Amino acid sequence: MRNLKNTITLETAIRWVKNWRKGTIINPTFIKSISMERINFDQVLAEPNVTRVKSYLGVNDQNQMVLLIVGTDDFDNDLFANDPSNHHIYDFSKVCPPRCAPKFSPLD
């Protein structure tokens, strides 16, 4: 098995997505951006039969917004659902604030 970075369990992902959908986050409009490490894209795209990438919004156990990604097939079926040994859920949780770039962006 490869040494993967930033993966989470299905149980954690379900909890976080449910938190988002029930409105657990206090002020979602406060989030300016979410940055993503390249390794997450590289890992999900290297999984077998991945032709698309899908994202889910969630709220983690620290009440912070998160972005989760999974690999899918051409029909947007989440591949981890049928093959969890070769497909994973990735946590893209580099949210600004608090993790903002030190330089100004015109989009901030």
Image (cartoon, rainbow, N blue to C red):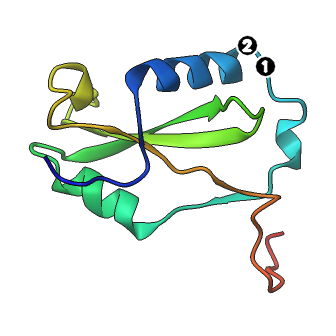
Q: How many labels sit on residues?
A: 2
Residue type of the residue flagged with mark 1: Gly
- The circle drawn on residue 23 is 1
Residue 73 in the image, given as x and y percentages of width and height: 19, 35
19 in relation to 87, above or below:
above
Mark 2 and mark 1 residues within 8 Å of each other at the beta carbon? yes
Residue for point 34% across, 45% down: 53
Disc 2 from disc 1: Cα separation: 4 Å
Residue for point 71% across, 39% down: 65
Residue 107 in the image, given as x and y percentages of width and height: 79, 71
19 in relation to 102, above or below:
above
For label 2, count other residues whose C-alpha is less than 10 Å away and answer few (under 14), some (14-19) or many (20+). few
Looking at the image, the residue that sits furthest to the bottom is 103
Residue 63 in the image, given as x and y percentages of width and height: 78, 32
- The circle drawn on residue 22 is 2
- The circle drawn on residue 8 is none
Q: Where on the picture, by quarter, is residue 48? A: top left
Q: Where on the picture, by quarter, is residue 39? A: bottom left
